[in-house]
Image (cartoon, coloured by chain):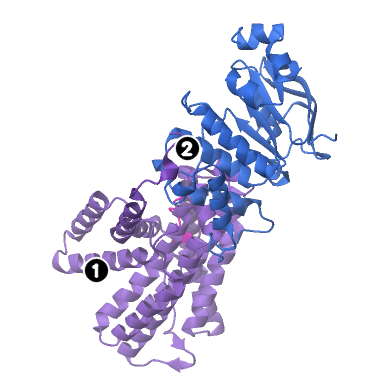
């Protein structure tokens, strides 16, 4: 942990760069990047959980909770502000995470994964049967505004959402870097490796898992709000297991060592999906599968290992020379 | 002298097996107590009960005047009992310094910080200081995965000691360490422990280590204490020679 760290605030620069770059991007890439950023937020939550040794197959639950929460409040109270909607989405995800975390933190490994999947599917089933929420068809919401400004021009509306997505993703990334480098972040890695020893050191492994779960739920709720604003429609598919599976895909592609990798992986997946859908309309799933296989085969620790591996190599070289103190140490 | 740890009538059964049979023992401050006994004599069970991993069927465990019977390992650790393990329990993907940093974080009052860097507030400095005591400072940034078994043993003990315990329990600190290196390793442990003025209880099978480093020896057999006293007296006791050392000395 001690080597090659960057100050988290350095990530402001790529955020500003991405915002400026958005001005020259074609319109279709703006919405693609918005969806990519939205998925990356949930995947970042999956990575947060993975760092403590757990994989959630049910983040769609919080993704849908954020989306439905925002959609209902937007339609009932006429709240259209994009920033406010993001905050509402985050609160919905966070509250649901707080309710579930005491139960879920008692499980680990496959039991943790299956319980999250089960909860998301229960929610999916409830949404399908709830006619006031549109049942399986869902319902629509209006176009979001920003700080009282409504965007009539489609390109400007897309750019506004892109900007909100980039800034939110940037803030989430900075927060995640700070979290990963923190005392809590280190304890999370320790929990993943040996939760019994963690207890013997006076740290509650369950509390660490629960806190990571709430953080992941908050990110998923925020993402649900962003996805809702991008699609202006919500339906139970938000909570379906294939949706949750996609977030796990992104996290697997990214690996758990780099925050930046999550966003790169999410964008890469969206690009591969879009282009394979365009050029291989009947076999695009095959192209997507080959891409995933290639990454898993050649980068088993994820896309992030492309740059974290180089950093480790540099550390290795600096530690390679044995010192006199090593002589006489037990082997 | 008021004991750091006072155990009275401790009992633990696993079905028909009596792992702890009415054990009573007082450990006074700054003692180095060695627990000896054949495999299955109940030494590790005793350590597991004291540290909260196992719940006793009967008896009391008082640490500095507070009954800790039934407390969780986390609570016992926070109250001042640390332990190392026969098989080192480390975070192998983390560096040596990070392993100790986690231990330092665990012992401080209040919740873990979500924003303060893990190495901040002197935590890394303290980790390095403790590694220095064990002669391991040069390995601070090495992942534990790359360390040998003997070094891992020392890191495991350093993690327990960095918590500044009132009572340090070491489960076979020299097992897995070669014959030539066991004294080097134990010298480092005793030197490091001495700087903390901690009371130490160590489970040990090697009678050379026991006679050289212990102030007091407690011999276990079938969950009972069969001898307790100065090393020479205990190691020459006929029951200890018969059931524990087999006349090894």
Mark number for residue A3?
A: none
Report the quarter where the C terminus of chain A lies: top left
SS at badge 1 = helix
Tag 2 subunit: B
Q: Label 2: which residue?
A: B151
The shade of chain A is: purple
**Residue B26 in magenta?**
no
Q: Position of residue A174 (x, y in %)?
A: 45, 71
Q: Which residues are magenta?
A: A54-61
Horizontally, residue A194 falls left or right of residue A269, namely right
Please tell me which residue is depicted at 60% across the width and 54% down the height of the picture.
Answer: B105
Rendered-image quadrant of the N terminus of chain A: bottom left
Q: Is residue B207 above or below residue A211?
A: above
2 and 1 marks on the same chain: no
Judged left or right of residue B5, residue A292 is left
Say left or right for B70 vs A36: right
**Toward which corner of the image does residue B25 lie, by quadrant?**
top right
- The residue that disc 1 covers is A271
Give the camera-side residue of B227 and B185. Answer: B185
Residue A60 belongs to magenta span: yes
């Amino acid at each position: 942990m001690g080597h090659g760290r960057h100050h988290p605030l350095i990530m402001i620069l790529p955020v500003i760069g991405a915002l400026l770059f958005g001005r020259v991007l074609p319109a279709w890439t703006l919405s693609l990047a918005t969806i990519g950023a939205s998925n990356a937020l949930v995947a970042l939550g999956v990575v947060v959980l993975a760092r403590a040794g757990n994989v959630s197959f049910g983040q769609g639950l919080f993704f849908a909770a954020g989306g439905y929460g925002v959609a209902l409040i937007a339609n009932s109270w006429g709240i259209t502000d994009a920033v406010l909607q993001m905050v509402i989405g985050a609160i919905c995800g966070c509250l649901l995470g707080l309710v579930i975390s005491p139960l879920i933190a008692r499980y680990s490994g496959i039991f943790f994964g299956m319980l999250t999947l089960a909860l998301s599917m229960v929610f999916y089933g409830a949404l399908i049967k709830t006619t006031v929420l549109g049942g399986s068809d869902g319902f629509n919401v209006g176009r979001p505004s920003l700080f009282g400004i409504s965007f009539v021009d489609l390109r400007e509306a897309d750019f506004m959402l892109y900007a909100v997505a980039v800034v939110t993703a940037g803030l989430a990334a900075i927060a995640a870097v700070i979290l990963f480098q923190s005392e809590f972040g280190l304890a999370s890695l320790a929990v993943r490796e040996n939760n019994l020893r963690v207890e013997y050191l006076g740290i509650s492994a369950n509390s660490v898992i629960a806190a990571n779960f709430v953080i992941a739920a908050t990110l998923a709720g925020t993402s649900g709000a962003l996805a809702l604003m991008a699609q202006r429609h919500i339906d139970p598919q938000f909570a379906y297991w294939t949706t949750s599976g996609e977030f796990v895909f992104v996290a697997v592609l990214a690996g758990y060592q780099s925050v930046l990798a999550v966003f790169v992986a999410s964008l890469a997946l969206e690009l591969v999906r879009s282009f394979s859908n365009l050029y291989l309309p009947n076999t695009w799933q095959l192209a997507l599968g080959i891409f995933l296989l290639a990454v898993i085969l050649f980068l088993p620790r994820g896309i992030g290992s492309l740059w974290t591996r180089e950093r480790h190599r540099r550390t290795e070289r600096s530690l390679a020379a044995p010192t006199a103190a090593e002589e006489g140490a037990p082997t | 002298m008021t004991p750091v740890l006072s155990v009275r009538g401790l009992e633990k059964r696993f079905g028909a097996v009596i792992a702890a049979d009415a054990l009573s023992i007082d450990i006074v401050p700054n003692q180095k107590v060695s627990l000896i006994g054949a495999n299955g004599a109940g030494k590790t069970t005793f350590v597991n009960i004291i540290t909260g991993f196992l719940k006793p069927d009967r008896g009391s465990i008082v640490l500095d005047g507070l009954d800790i019977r039934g407390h969780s390992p986390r609570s016992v650790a926070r109250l001042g009992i640390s332990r190392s393990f026969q098989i080192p329990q480390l975070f192998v993907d983390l560096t040596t310094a990070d392993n100790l940093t986690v231990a330092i974080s665990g012992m401080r009052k209040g919740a873990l910080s979500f924003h303060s860097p893990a190495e901040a507030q002197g935590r890394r400095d303290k980790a390095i200081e403790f590694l220095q005591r064990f002669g391991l400072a040069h390995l601070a940034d090495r992942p534990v995965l790359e360390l040998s078994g003997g070094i891992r043993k020392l890191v495991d003990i350093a993690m327990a000691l960095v918590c500044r315990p009132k009572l340090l329990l070491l489960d076979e600190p020299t097992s897995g360490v070669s014959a030539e290196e066991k004294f080097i390793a134990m010298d480092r442990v005793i030197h490091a422990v001495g700087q903390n003025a901690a009371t130490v209880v160590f489970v040990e099978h090697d009678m050379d280590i026991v006679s050289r480093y212990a102030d007091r020896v407690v011999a276990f057999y079938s969950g009972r204490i069969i001898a307790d006293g100065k090393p020479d007296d205990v190691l020459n006791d006929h029951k200890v020679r018969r059931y524990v050392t087999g006349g090894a000395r």
